[in-house]
Image: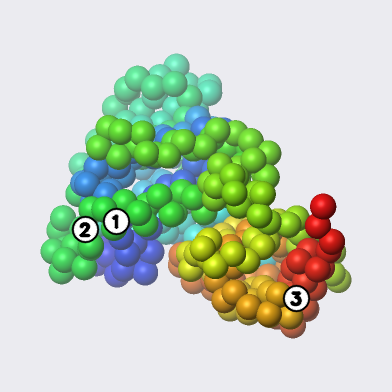
Amino acid sequence: DELISQIAAGEVVERPASVVRELVDNALDAGATQVTVRLLAGGVRLVSVEDDGGGIPRDELPIALRRHATSKIGSLQDLEQVATMGFRGEALAAIASVSELSILSRTPGQPSAFLLDGRSGELRPAARAGGTTVEVKELFFSTPARRKFLKTDATELAHCIEAVRRHALARPETGFAIWHEGKLVEQWRPASRDQRLADVLGEDFLAQSVAIDQVVGPVRVTGRAGIPDAARSRPDHQFAYVNGRYVRDKVLTHAARSAYEDVLHGQRQPVYALYLDIEPSRVDVNVHPTKIEVRFRDGREVHQAVRRAVEAALAAPRA
Ligand code: ADP
Ligand code: MG
């Protein structure tokens, strides 16, 4: 089972940023209003994610580390309508198999928190306010071949920040903070979506972008599209969300790029944030363990919706 977990970990956990992504997913699923990420050595020595969400009851702590243990869906039908970030029950088991993982958690009803040590399985009372802290230490310490693939701390840190940024743009109502080596490196306070876009992508993005808001068939597309400016073209600043989930998808990228080419004849890497709302049964999120890829039931319909919505925004007269 240890071996199977480690193989599964290869698909879910590539680097510290993968741990950040999964732990922040869990914090958001737990209803957190504030998520604090603490890192040491770019996350290789420590990724700690602290939330003020619903917590994990004492008796469920050991279960949370088991493979395919999820509290989020109970049936195949739920899988069709999945509204949480997680649903596969793989992440914690996979991460625990390649690190030293501990969970400190307290539900509102419990008189104290409990600390579970993932290695020993020891469970003991501890102190904490309501919510959960998951600590992941020494990633890949037992798999030196994997550890060798990690880049410098600075690069791993940049990937960790990017992982939080992706969540932050999806959840403006949640506060985020990132600490590295004891220093606060990013802080995004709860805000409106436009304000969060400005906080994360820069005030100039807000000033130099147009609002997108169109319903095309079964797809609602909202967000903001940057007005091209060669200086601000960023290859890593194309954000797309489907039902609140960050995705990387060729259909969406192509549709957005086509809109820019049609209306403005250029700029291959415009900065934009696109939010698609679509009936859950029209999109399959269970395509890849990292859930970063999705499959649309009708890719053409989605392509058309995004292209039209971005075109309309870019073509609209600006004040
Ligand atoms: P999944 O998110 O797919 O359910 P995970 O392995 O990420 O699987 O987490 C396993 C379970 O642990 C979750 O279903 C949830 O019940 C619990 N859990 C993990 N992190 C948290 C958290 N921060 N707050 C509350 N519950 C959590
Ligand atoms: Mg999860």
- Tag 2–tag 1 contact (CB < 8 Å): yes
**Residue 220: percent from the left, percent from the top?**
79, 62
**Residue 105: percent from the left, percent from the top?**
41, 31
Is 112 positioned to the left or the right of 100 in the image? Answer: right
Q: CA distance from mark 3 to mark 2?
A: 41 Å
Residue type indicated by callout 2:
Thr
Tag of residue 152: 2
Q: Looking at the figure, which quarter contains the N terminus? A: bottom left
Q: Please tell me which of labels 3 and 2 falls first in the chain.
A: 2
Asked if one can make out residue 252 in the rendered structure from this viewpoint, the answer is yes
Relative to 112, is 275 above or below? below
**Residue 196: percent from the left, percent from the top?**
60, 42
Q: Which residue lies under the disc numbered 3?
A: 263
Q: Report the residue at 35% width, 54% height from top.
A: 158
Tag of residue 156: 1
Q: Residues within 10 Å of mark 3 (few under 14, many from 20)?
A: some
Q: CA distance from mark 2 to mark 1?
A: 6 Å
Residue type indicated by callout 1:
Glu
Relative to 250, is 73 above or below? above
Q: In the depicted view, which residue is nearer to us: 51 or 158?
A: 158
Relative to 99, is 229 above or below? below
Q: Report the residue at 44% width, 27% height from top.
A: 106
Q: Please tell me which of labels 3 and 1 falls first in the chain.
A: 1
- Tag 3–tag 2 contact (CB < 8 Å): no
Q: Nearer the viewer, mark 3 or mark 2?
A: 3
Tag of residue 288: none
Residue type indicated by callout 3:
Val
Q: Report the residue at 48% width, 68% height from top.
A: 235
Relative to 126, is 316 above or below? below
